[in-house]
Amino acid sequence: MPLEFEFERPILELEKRLRDLQSLSEEGHIDLSREINAIASKIEAMKIDIFKNLEPWQVAQIARHPQRPNTLDYINILCGDTFVEIHGDREFHDDPAIVSGFGIIEGRAVALIGHQKGHDTNENLFRNFGMPQPEGFRKAQRLLRLAEKFKKPIIAFIDTPGAFPGIGAEERGQCEAIAHNIMLMARIKVPVLCFVIGEGGSGGALAIGVGDRVFMLENSVYSVISPEGCAAILWKDASKAKDAAKAMRIVSSDLMSLGVIDGILREPIGGAHHDYEFAATSVRETISTHLPVLQAMTQNDLLERRYKKFRSMGKFKISPEIEDA
Amino acid sequence: MGWLSKLTGSKKTEIPSDLWNKCPKCNEILIKKDLAKNLHLCPKCDFHLRMPVWDRIAMLTDNNSFVELDNQMESSDPLNFLDTMPYTERIQKSICATDTFDAITCGEATLDGHRILLGVMNFEFMGGSMGSVVGEKVTRLMELAYEKKIPVVIVSSSGGARMQEGILSLMQMAKTSQTIARLAEVSVPYISILTDPTTGGVSASFAMLGDINMAEPGSLIGFAGPRVIEQTIRQKLPDGFQRSEFLLQHGILDLVIHRRQMKSILSKILKLLN
Ligand SMILES: [Zn+2]
């Protein structure tokens, strides 16, 4: 694991001691099994203690871990060689920050869309760190329409810091592209399952995030603006990102209690980057559970329920003391 | 006299500072009460200043035809949000300062005799930001339009989603956009008017989803704010970048219309589409 977090340090230190003891015991032919077992169980207890009590800002760090499984990692595990990638918006460009295509999961042909981050600098430069241009969103629109035409359910993977803020992006209508995606997805006549697998950053995330069911991986985050961006605007100090992360309620349990998502998917302890298969299995099982339910619904029922789901989001009050003039 | 007359060397500006404004474009001193009579246009350079909600409603609707809807809806601080000030306090301040409960005023009215449902956003209320109240009011307006088959006009002015309501603000983009999709299914026109500034979560949802999207001249319209873009690409932005005329040229907007012509063009479009 190339990147280690400050909050993991006590675990890493114990693990090192464990390795030292193990080699000492092997080389010296002495029985240290009692000490070794004690440390091993201490490590397990400490892992549970640390990873069950992470601060929102720490979860955001895990969500952005460079080795965290990305969209193509999930697609490769779930679809294997059945996946066929569909490139380009047929208007301007192929945006590598969004991947789309068709594949088979558990015997079902599905359409797949996702933001694509890289695992290293080169990959990230190519993928623009998962920040789409308008043509990326328009590529997704093409796929949504194809999925509808051929009656294939849609699986969306959300993992972006946000839509790219650049000159070309604005010239080509970034805001229109996102708005159009959201509107199209809200009424698409096939089931849509969304998975926030890492970073759900703002409108660029929601652009492929309007689904009949929306799930978050345990250590993913989803927010209206990045904690850094929020801190810079409201606290006038980007270093207050920790406070902003907490105040905005960006972790999966928050979104569950706010009624924005339908479920939280388990990850291996320490984060999905420790075990891709584990994380992919969570996704596969969720698809297998929910897709048949959605596919059994009539088209009207599906659309009406999706409408009501997003219709009910938001909290407000009607102030009683003011009467109509 | 004070520093102002020294600065301008002009006698006619010897008036209390709360009664005048400066034109952001040509620096002309503008007397507020004259401005209101001139539709908040600079008499010297024609710059479109931000227009107060009720002046906008008066300009676009027939005399006394506007009946406000949902005027008692107020934010309930769903996250108990606290930054350098509690969100509830920011809300109360904005309510006192603007005499409205949130960043959009909605109602039913006639425009040259055409029945319309009208929403006008108020940038003075927390930067026109969209939280649950704006989302719900836009949604109700669209749903009423769907039921009664009345065209909708929304005048936007917003910095984007309201951070203090977190993810719920983001979800208002989905909530409002889906009602527009549904309205489109029954062929009721929705005309979006973008004014200075319209960015972020509002431009990336209902403001860009009109059957006709038009803007006032010189309005800042875009997804990302210019400062964010400059910081990201470390490059100076070209002149006129993200202004209405720039968007028109790039094919993103349908029309750029002078404020004085706004009502008559709306009337024409309503007649043509309805
Ligand atoms: Zn001027």
Image: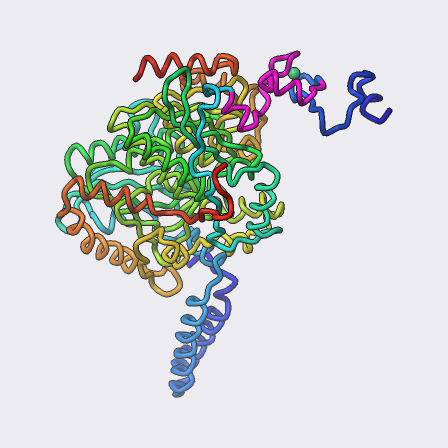
For image coordinates 54% across by 47% down, the residue present is: A228
Question: Residue B141: where, in percent of width, then height?
Answer: 37, 33
Q: Is residue A324 shown in magenta?
A: no
The answer to whether B31 is drawn above or below residue A236 in the figure is: above
Q: Which quarter shows the N terminus of chain A?
A: bottom left
Q: Quadrant of the rendered structure where residue A35 is? A: bottom left
Question: Residue B1: where, in percent of width, then height?
Answer: 87, 24
> Along the line of sight, which residue is nearer the eye, B235 or A205?
A205
Magenta residues (range): B29-58
Question: Residue A302: where, in percent of width, then height?
Answer: 20, 43
Left or right relative to A149: residue B44: right
For image coordinates 50% across by 67% down, the residue present is: A9
> Along the line of sight, which residue is nearer the eye, A123 or B206?
B206
The answer to whether A310 is drawn above or below residue A14 in the figure is: above
Left or right relative to A48: residue B242: right
| Residue A161 visible | no
Left or right relative to B51: residue A298: left
Q: Quadrant of the rendered structure where residue B228 is? A: top right
If the picture is divided into quarters, which one holds ligand 1? top right
Question: Residue A98: where, in percent of width, then height?
Answer: 34, 37
For image coordinates 78% across by 24% down, the residue present is: B15
